[in-house]
Amino acid sequence: MNRDPSPFATFDDVSVPRETGLTSLPGPYHNLTFSSFSVFNPHSPSLAPIISPDDLNCAVSAPNALLGSRTSDTGAVASFEVANGTAGDDDNEEEGGLQRLSFTLHALAVKPMAAPEPGTNLSIRGYREGESDLAWSVWFPSGYHDPLVVSIAEFSGVRWEKLRKVEIAADFGYDGLDWEFCIDDVVLEFDRSEKSGAAYEGGNGIGRQILLQAGGLASQTP
C-alpha cells in the first residue's frame, strides 16, 4: 500500500466473552455500521471444537477478527456502511452544513473458513451514489489458505472511492451455497468534505485513513 494508515482503529478493543469466543460488533464502530458480522477470537478455547487450527490465522494479529456470512433469516449479505446519523449523513445534515460522508476502500485481508472441495468464491462489491457499482471477486480452491490481502485499486484496476457501503459474500461450490469467511485489516479513508467546517469523529474536514484491524497485514498475494 502507498500510505501509512493513521490513526489505527482495531477490533481488538472489542471485549469478546471467553465463554462464547465471539460477540456482536458495537455500532456505530468508527462511523461505520457492520451487518452480519461477529467479532471473534479464533484462539478462544470455546471455539476449538468448531474452528480448525488452520483457520486460527484469521486473526492476523491477535486476538480478534471478523466472521461474516449471509443472515439465516433474510439472506442479507454481510456489509459495512456509513452509519446513520454520522456527520455528513442526510439525517444529520443541515442546509449549508456537511456533505454526505463517504469513504475510499484501500485494502482488506480475507479468506473463507475451511476449504472443502471444490472451493469458494469470495466477492466484494462497493456502492456509490449516482455512479456504477464496483465489484471484484476471487476463487479460493480447496485447501486451507492464509488471509489474502486485497489491495483494491491494484487488484481491481480502479480506485474504490466515494463509497457509502461495501458488501462481502462467500459462495461455496458450483451451486453457490452461502459460506462463512473472515476479514481483517480493513484499510479505508473517509473522503474529504468540500464544505467548510466539516468534522467527523475527531476530523477537521481533511480525509483520514483508518486501519480497522484485528491484526497486522498479511503478505500480499496478487
Image: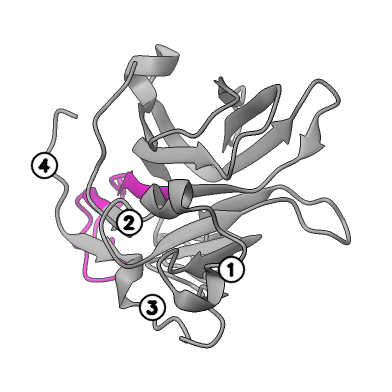
Give above or below for 24 relative to 183: below
* Label 1: element kind: helix
Marks 4 and 2 sit apart, C-alpha to C-alpha, by 13 Å
Q: Label 3, on which residue?
A: 14
The answer to whether residue 209 is magenta is: yes
Q: How is the rendered protein coloured?
A: one colour
Cα distance in 3D space between marks 4 and 1? 32 Å
Q: Which residue is mark 2?
A: 212
User: Does residue 38 appear anywhere in the picture?
Assistant: yes
Residue type at mark 4? Asp
Local packing at callout 1 (Cα closer than 10 Å; few below 14, some 14-19, many 20+) is few
> Is 73 or 112 nearer to us in this picture?
112
Region in magenta: 183-210
The amino acid pointed to by label 3 is Val
> For the point 66% across and 37% down, which residue is it?
170
Q: In x, y percent, where is residue 162?
A: 44, 37
- What residue is at 45 percent from the left and 46 percent from the top? 54
Residue 159, x across and y down, in percent:
37, 23
The tag earlier along the polypeptide, 2 or 3, is 3
Q: Secondary structure at mark 2?
A: strand
